[in-house]
Image: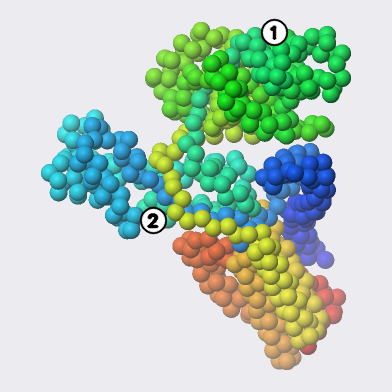
Amino acid sequence: MKEFTFRTILIIGAFALGIYLLYPTFADVENTKDINKKLAQISENIKVKDPSISESDLQKKITSARDSLMKADPSILKNREKRIKLGLDLQGGMYLVMEINTTKMLEKLAKNPDDVFAKCLQEADSETKVSEENVVSVLARKLKANGKRMSLYFDFGDIKASDSDIEDKLKQLEKDAVTRAVEIISKRVNQYGVSEPNIQTQGSRRIVLELPGVSNMEEARSLVQKGAVLEFKLFVKPQVAFALMQRIDQTLAGTDSVKAGSDSSKNATAEQFAKQHPFFKMAMIEDQSQKIADTYVSAENRDKLERIFERPDIKKMIDDAGAQFVFDSKPVVNKDGSFYKMYVLNAKPELTGDVVVNATAHIDQTDNKPVVNMEMNDDGTAEWARITGQNVGQRCAVVLDGVVYTAPYIQERISGGQSRISGSANMEEAKLLEIVLKAGALPAPVVPIEERIVGPSLGQDSVNEGLNSGIYGFILVSLFMIIYYKNGGVVAFAGLFFTILISLAVLAAFHGVLTLPGIAGVVLSMGMAVDANVLIYERIREELETGKTLRAAVDSGFSMSFSAILDSNITTLITGVILYQFGTGPVQGFALTLMIGIAASLFSALVFSRLIFDYFVSKGQMIKLG
């Protein structure tokens, strides 16, 4: 039995590892069912309490509730992260084609543009919309036809640069703009929480996005197109911020109400307080004194406050104070629900993200806590030294697209352009801050060319049909093998199950995406696995007919079939590699699962099945092959 020990341990280890890797997928399915039930109940309760609620407001509340439920138990998010991801065709989502508007980029780069330049650029823009020709090339050709040199409008600091050099430089900038746009959009989409998005270039200036699970077209478009404004803003002085809040509170109440925190407010009932202080009812201040601590707003009240801040009278009040109310990027979740920190910042930024050249997140060796080191250019270095020197002890918020990602205290004057930002709760949060600091703005505007929604019903139909095809294929192949090869078919059935288990486990381990073509790849790998068993079984039959012993027949059956099995599988594997390397989207999904399935089927046929045959032969028994 010692001869079987290593193979037995190997197979048991592979099986246990497969179950371990697939457990998060099973757990996520159960968690999703449970969360959907709770959301349905929450939706009904909201409709009962507020029958006139709009669909958009209802969806916002449902989304907020979903976020709270997902974050209530850390294991839920952990399992979701490790599950097998489903592609756009299986779970529905969005398909976007965006185009980099290099015309706008050239407008910004041009020095002293005149009417001729504007006319040529407009014509170049029109021509390239119906062709794949480069905007820069068309512009250079038209300027030359009008007797204008490129150097008249573009200067990159090299006085010896020819028009062809400038054209090459602009083409490189255009290419870099697309690459940079893909990088920035990828970071935004990942931060948005889209599982396994597919983002790739198409042609010279188009970007194709597949966003599984996303259904809000407007929100996704905004995410991709927004300019990513990174700003560093100082806090409004606490007493000024509190006075502004009081004025807003009084305006909303329609009367000169008593100060929040006074004896009358403390003794008032909750209903009276809400009527007297509508603002402070929504914005809960930890320390209602002249030195304000943090202000918290529930997810529900955040939407209300944002609408209030846009009221003309309130907006004028805030603008006159040179202030801005900004919320934290992520909520604080506790047993009472989700709450956002709200900050009162100076409307005018001290610095913008243009000065940041690099950022790195790491663990500080002194206190073992995450920090982010930020590096600025020369202009930013000088300005940052002045700002930090004048505001030691004050807080400075890092704001991206109108939300605060961190708000550390300035400990000392920072010179040399190197800044250290602490306060991140964990390394993941520090890494997110690093991404925010490095993300910057899109190098050129992006405009939507094509937009499609794969509806949830279509996605669910695809899931059902795909899974059914896999299940039916498994059942039919297994039945054929059992009927034709008797006990040998049972071994093939066990090997087939083992093959599928390992294939899906590997897919989960490497964060692969399962698509409808991917399921086709799994089904095809079933056929390849059975093909190996057929070759082995038929060879064993032939060897037995020649009068060989059980041991000799099994040994010959596996050894003589090895070359044929290896040849067919290697050929298919090479095909899969080529498809994955040069294919896109669905083709890659098919190729990936096919390659994984081939490797798993080889292991199943040559190790798993062989172990079972060897075990029975060692006992003097033969597995019936028909």
- Quadrant containing the C terminus is bottom right
What residue is shown with label 2? 203
Q: Looking at the image, is mark 1 or mark 2 nearer the viewer?
A: 1
Amino acid type, label 1: Gln
**Residue at the location (70% across, 76% down)?**
473
**Residue at the location (73% across, 63% down)?**
501
Amino acid type, label 2: Gly
Q: Quadrant of residue 614?
A: bottom right
Where's residue 299, x and y in %? 72, 33
Q: Is residue 529 visible?
A: no
Where's residue 121, x and y in %? 26, 45
Of 571 and 551, which appears nearest the observer?
A: 571
**Residue at the location (77% across, 18% down)?**
276
What residue is shown with label 1? 290
Mark 2: few/some/many CA within 10 Å (<14, 14-19, 20+)? few
Where's residue 547, x and y in %? 74, 91
Circle 2 sits in a helix, a strand or a loop, which is it?
loop
Of 513 and 127, which appears nearest the observer?
A: 127
Q: CA distance from mark 1 to mark 2?
A: 59 Å
Locate residue 182 relative to residue 154 in the image: left or right: right
Mark 2 and mark 1 in contact (Cβ < 8 Å)? no
Q: Is residue 125 visible?
A: yes
Of 139 and 313, which appears nearest the observer?
A: 313
Q: Quadrant of residue 77?
A: top right
**Residue at the location (47% across, 56% down)?**
450
